[in-house]
Amino acid sequence: MLLQRQGKNDEAKVQCENMLLSHIIQSTSMLATIANISISTENYENAQIYIDAIRKLQSLFNVGLHSGDYNLCKLYIKK
């Protein structure tokens, strides 16, 4: 916000994009952990919800290495 107030909009935009990307990556990591916990406790319905969220985030922001797809495959095998 400080950069924006100083009129440095280009720099502010880059900083915001970098922070957003970092938060998206952290969020997908946390969702994967929760999904794995759900799988280990055989709560497959919740695991599916978290994995779907990962896949949507990765698709929407074009990030990740398709770990959501990989986790979905693991879930189907486990089931």
Image (tube, rainbow, N blue to C red):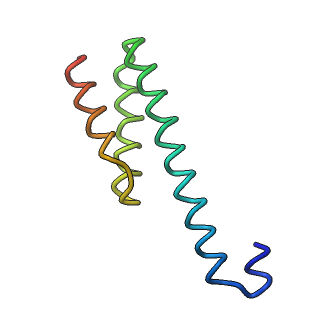
Is 16 located above or below residue 24 in the figure? Answer: below
Residue 3 in which image quadrant: bottom right
Q: In the displayed structure, does residue 40 sit left or right of residue 78?
A: right
4 to 46, vertically: above or below: below
Q: Position of residue 29 (x, y in %)?
A: 48, 37
- Residue depicted at 79% across the width and 84% down the height: 6
Question: Which quarter of the figure has residue 2?
Answer: bottom right
- Vertically, is 74 above or below 30? above
Tell me if 25 is positioned left or right of 56 in this view. right
Q: Quadrant of the N terminus?
A: bottom right
Residue 13 left/right relative to 46: right
In this view, the residue farthest toward the bottom is: 7
Between 46 and 65, the one nearer to me in the picture:
65
Q: Residue 23 in the image: x percent, y percent?
A: 57, 51
Residue occupying the point 37% across, 13% down: 42
Residue at the (47%, 28%) spot, across then down: 33
Q: Quadrant of residue 39?
A: top left
Quadrant in which the C terminus appears: top left
